[in-house]
Amino acid sequence: MKKHIVLLPGDGIGKEVIQSAKDVLEAVAAEFDHSFTFETQDIGGCAIDLHGIPLPESTVTACKQADAVLLGAVGGPEWDRLPSHLRPEKGLLGIRKALNLFANLRPVKAFPNLLHASPLKEAVVSGSDLLIVRELIGGLYFGTPSERSVDGQSVVDTLTYTKKEIEQIVDKAFQSAQLRKGHLTSVDKANVLESSKLWRETVEEKQAQYPDVTVEHMLVDAAAMKLVTNPKSFDVIVTENMFGDILSDEASVLTGSLGMLPSASLNQAGVGLYEPVHGSAPDIAGKGIANPLAMILSTALMLRHSFQLEKEARLIETAVQAVLDDGYHTADLQIENGHQVGTEQMTEMIVELIKSQS
Ligand code: ATP
Ligand code: MG
């Protein structure tokens, strides 16, 4: 299979972990006789330094022409004082919108060897394996008006959804549930918000098309509680942009480390953007100690969702599992009697396993 992949390293540890992703994909390509070509483009803080803006047109054009996009992370203290339209995060919001990436998939899986790092009892978390499907380009984050009054004494943010926007994310969630355990939890605030009422209605209408999926509606406050009291009861969660943002950070804590969580952002055409859930981690950037596993697991999502290469995706996930089972970990993780390694060594071990397992 021939694919062209755009790499957006971004800032901080983004640059370090993107190299791990490339190494792993090159190993996969060699083992399975695929041809992956790579092209690097600027986004975030480094793009501000080089081009004066966080999302240059050249980056957008390259991403639109690519088969998939891998992103490291954007931002850092160097750019914190810039005016809001010149912030590194605007690059990220901009590329999501430009590629029409309406669906954000965040798998949350608890690896047994890391569970003692979870704030919850092992018994509660072990076996947790859920997927959050978050609407990514609508809702409060993109509503207009979003502004402060002239006298500065009042503010407005706008929450807008069209039925069509809800339908497309709900379809994606039902389809994801069909590929998993067949259970969908739709999270809203339908007792208060008009947008949530339309959301709930739409899920109920869509249900008829997916008779093999069971559906449950849950208010967001209840869902927040249940994620910590009984995470194992979830399979797929579908929700709007802001609820999804908050719930996925909450869920990420279950696994014991931010450095373990991949994500996929998809559009209808299947061109996806794949990135770790963590940020640019300026505190550890340049030290060679960043955990590359979230980024590496993101490449597995790319192979699965953009290229339909399930076997290759599984191979990467199995290699990650095996390295952790052997007790190898980066500084952000703790494993009893384990062996601490750096970014490069961790990547190298995954690459070696890929070469030997296929
Ligand atoms: P951003 O605003 O870019 O999201 P943030 O400060 O919210 O940044 P992160 O950059 O993700 O969040 O960092 C939060 C903490 O987690 C930091 O102490 C960082 O060192 C640590 N961390 C994040 N990602 C990793 C990783 N891949 N490996 C090791 N430590 C990490
Ligand atoms: Mg953050």
Image: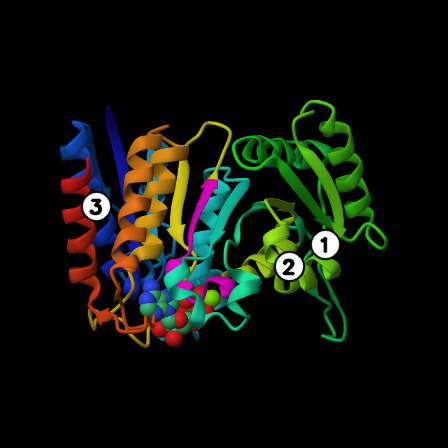
Q: Residue furthest right?
A: 191
Q: Are marks 1 and 2 in contact (CB under 8 Å)?
A: no
Decide if residue 232 is on the left or right side of residue 209.
Answer: left
The first of marks 3 and 2 along the sequence is: 3
- Left or right of 25, for residue 82: right
Position above or below: 172 against 264: above
Q: CA distance from mark 3 to mark 1?
A: 42 Å
- The residue beneath circle 1 is 158
Per the rendering, the mark at residue 230 is 2
For the C terminus, which image quadrant?
top left
Q: Which residue matches tag 3?
A: 24
Query: Can you say whether 111 is above or below 208 in the image?
Result: below
Q: Residue at x 17, y 54 (%)?
A: 349
Please report the bounds of the magenta region as a residue range.
253-265
Q: Amino acid at mark 2?
A: Asn
Mark 3 burial class by Cα count in 10 Å: few <14, some 14-19, many 20+: many
Of marks 1 and 2, which one's residue comes earlier in the chain? 1
Is label 1 or label 2 in front? 2
